[in-house]
Amino acid sequence: MEVVPLRQVAAIMAGGRGERFWPLSRQSCPKQFLPLISEKTMLQETVGRLAPLLGPEDIYVVTGAQYATRVAEQLPDLPRENIILEPEGRDTAPCIALTAAYLAHRYPGEDAVLAVLPADHLITKPDLFRQILAGAFALAAAEPVLVTIGMSPSRPETGYGYIKCGEKVPWSGRHFVYRVQRFTEKPDRAAAEAFLKEGGYLWNSGMFVWRLSTLREAFQRHLPEVAAALPTLTAACGGPAEALAATFHSLPRISIDYGVMEKADNVYVIPGDFGWDDVGTWSALARLFTADADENVTIVNAPAAHGAAAVQEPILLGSKRCVVSGNGRLVAALGVEDLIIVDTDDALLICRRGQEQNLKSVLEQLRRDHRTAYL
């Protein structure tokens, strides 16, 4: 009997608000829709690197209803029915459950191998990325396992999760995978340094591959309330938006890492050193640009996101290790160190480097003050 290959699809999660890139990233146009690292937006880069492994018909974008038009404009080759709209943001486990339900509704009775990918990461070696992703598809198709892709740590990063590798398992020629021993969420500096010294740890990239049937079994075992809602969610995908919203709202607000991956015992990780960076903060973005003799970095692409004038080279006298993103106006800094300076049409951010993780507190203050125009 001939074995029919499973359909391979990718879902790109593009519903985030990109708050750590405020004030350039706003609710109306968050990070994934900005051209931060090239002339293309982060979303366009993410979709583009999947070809030729996947065609547009097998790529889905999961986003909020308010971004549907923006996704369609940025991805004109993507079928409109491949834009999956989240009724609200409820973290990655409900997002992935909605994707599984949508695929079950669209292809009833059919299993498939699903890759879940963030929309706003940098990958500088796309050929190697596609090679690793193809291997992850093959592994997930062959075995009832949950596959993730990890990156070799190059520094004691406290903004990433870590994966402790267990048993090494060979697969597909010279490649190999590891059983996952455990996940650790964003450690403190001492723990991160200890992980690097010990070895055997990878950064958690937030990329996952699994069969839909394996994912449903994982939900049943580790998030039974999500599993119980899947049939209703699947039926709702073809009905009124209100019914879908009500069912989706009933799902727990939890990440797939906490809800499933950290609990499961059938998780494998593939090392994937293909030039990855999650570009999660202004300081992270600065790593991608050339610094001057005083380690100052000028972000040259970001202001083009809003059609601003050409960036004026900043004047940085007696200043060191500063990150500057302008909007066409001249920025001058005298005798300062370790600052992030982001100038936009209506807001100016001045932040100590390393404090970007606390940018949410600025946005919370804006909400309390009802200054929503700046969000």
Image (tube, grey):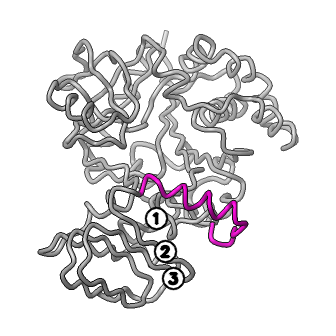
Please state if 141 lies on the left or on the right of 130 as rendered.
right
Q: Secondary structure at mark 1?
A: loop
**Foreground of the two, 114 or 360:** 360
Q: Earlier in the sequence, mark 1 or mark 3?
A: 1
**Pointer 1 with pointer 2, Cβ within 8 A:** yes
Residue drawn at point x = 46 percent, y = 72 percent: 349
Residue 246 rendering spot, x and y as whole percentages: 83, 36
Q: CA distance from mark 3 to mark 2?
A: 6 Å
**Pointer 3 with pointer 2, Cβ within 8 A:** yes
Q: Secondary structure at mark 2?
A: helix
- Residue topped by disc 2: 305
Residue drawn at point x = 62 percent, y = 37 percent: 95
Residue drawn at point x = 34 percent, y = 56 percent: 354
Q: Is residue 113 above or below residue 375?
A: above
Residue extent of the magenta highlight: 356-375
Q: Is residue 192 magenta?
A: no
Residue 350 rendering spot, x and y as whole percentages: 42, 72
Q: What residue type is disc 2 on? A: Ala
- Residue topped by disc 3: 307
Query: What numbered label is drawn on residue 41?
Result: 1
**Foreground of the two, 140 or 243:** 243
Q: What residue type is disc 3 on? A: Gly
Q: What residue type is disc 1 on? A: Thr
Q: Earlier in the sequence, mark 1 or mark 2?
A: 1
